[in-house]
Image (spheres, rainbow, N blue to C red):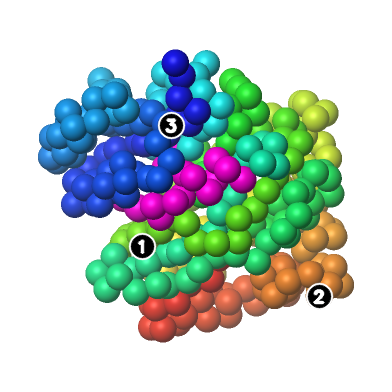
Amino acid sequence: MNPKVNVIVPVYNVAPYLTEFFESLMQQTFQDFDVWVVNDKSTDCSLDIIENFASRFSDKIHIINNEENLGLCGARNAGLNHCDSQGEYILLLDSDDYIDSRFLEKMVDTADRYHADITICGLERFDDKTGKTICIEMINNPEKLVTDIKNFDLLGYMNPVVWNKLYRRTVIADTRFTTIKRSEDTVFLFSVIPEVKSIKFINEVLYHYRLRDTSLSGAITTEIFDSMLEGFKETKENFSRDKKYSEFMELFVIQMFIRCGIGGACRLSFKNMRKAQFYINTTRKFMDQNFPEWRTNKYLTLRYACKKSVHAMAVSCASMMYKCHLFVLIVYAYWLMSHVLKKDFRA
């Protein structure tokens, strides 16, 4: 008998965090699930820990050993391919985080009750060294079931990460992750969104995301940033060839601006603040050449954002600063907040 939920867990050299992750997963109050652990050619003792838990929970945990390191996207795809026709829902979790004991119960119960295609919960980002909460996200969303997807502007601003979302398997279908090295979750979300008929939010923190030393700046390099820009460019080109994506393009452009224009440019600048203006100019040039509509996007205007949220206002202000060639001021402000005050702002 197929499980109701298939949980896909890519693993690559996260041995220090695996025990806490697996314990939080196996202690769930909801137990109708299987786990597909994709060992992406780990070189530490991650596989030993995985095999230990697999021996204890042999009816639930399945190990997929990649013959070569495929990266996060490739590992997730390997998991999706193995459980392609099984179960009703799919979860894609990160193996260095942990989840609330009622995470699965609440997500599945909500998805069942509202017949939601995507169910999204709140999340906490916490500092790996101190355990202190850095920020809490996704807890001020609409209480009602969202069914008018094409006019749901929060899609442009919300955090697109996959790990706080329960997907109905039939909605994902044949969709797979691309080779983009950052913002792969954004591309994945917008790849499936035309098939989504309903979204339900749980405005409660059920997922705990670990911020490690590399989370703010070290996790991005020039190579990764270039891959992200190229990935967004290719995704737009692919979407432009299929009419079903046209009504979501404005919202996709907002996400591009947030991930590339704000997040990417800021975090790359943090590695060498003397080159901040160069990275900003490069990003602006990329957006003007490949996403020229960012300058006239209604969602990026102050007139529109002032009727929405503080976050929407912040994004529109960033857009205005880009147009005025003053975005470097936001880079310095963000650096001060994240590196000195140890705070982080997110969608």
What's the mark number on residue 306? Answer: 2
Front in this rendered view, residue 144 or 340: 144
Q: Position of residue 277 (x, y in %)?
A: 54, 70
User: Gap between marks 1 and 3, in whole Å?
Assistant: 30 Å
Q: Quadrant of the C terminus?
A: bottom right
Q: Position of residue 287 (x, y in %)?
A: 68, 53
Amino acid tagged 3: Asp
Disc 1 to disc 3: CB gap under 8 Å? no
Which residues are drawn in magenta? 92-110
Above or below residue 58? Residue 308 is below
* 308 sits left or right of 311 in the view: right
How crowded is the residue under tag 1: few (<14 C-alpha within 10 Å), some, or many (20+)? some
How crowded is the residue under tag 2: few (<14 C-alpha within 10 Å), some, or many (20+)? some
Magenta includes 102? Answer: yes
Helix, strand or loop at label 2? It is loop
Q: Position of residue 193 (x, y in %)?
A: 70, 37
- Give the residue displayed 21% in from the left and 47% down from the top: 19
Helix, strand or loop at label 3? It is loop
- Give the residue displayed 27% in from the left and 73% down from the top: 130
Amino acid tagged 2: Cys
Q: Quadrant of the N terminus?
A: top left
Judging by the rendered image, the residue that carries numbered circle 1 is: 211
- Give the residue displayed 69% in from the left and 75% down from the top: 310
Amino acid tagged 1: Leu
* 296 sits left or right of 180 in the view: right
Front in this rendered view, residue 202 or 109: 109
Judging by the rendered image, the residue that carries numbered circle 3 is: 32
- Give the residue displayed 76% in from the left and 36% down from the top: 197
The answer, for residue 81, to whether it is visible in the render is no
* Mark closer to the chain start, 1 or 3: 3
User: Gap between marks 1 and 2, in whole Å?
Assistant: 31 Å
* Mark closer to the chain start, 3 or 2: 3
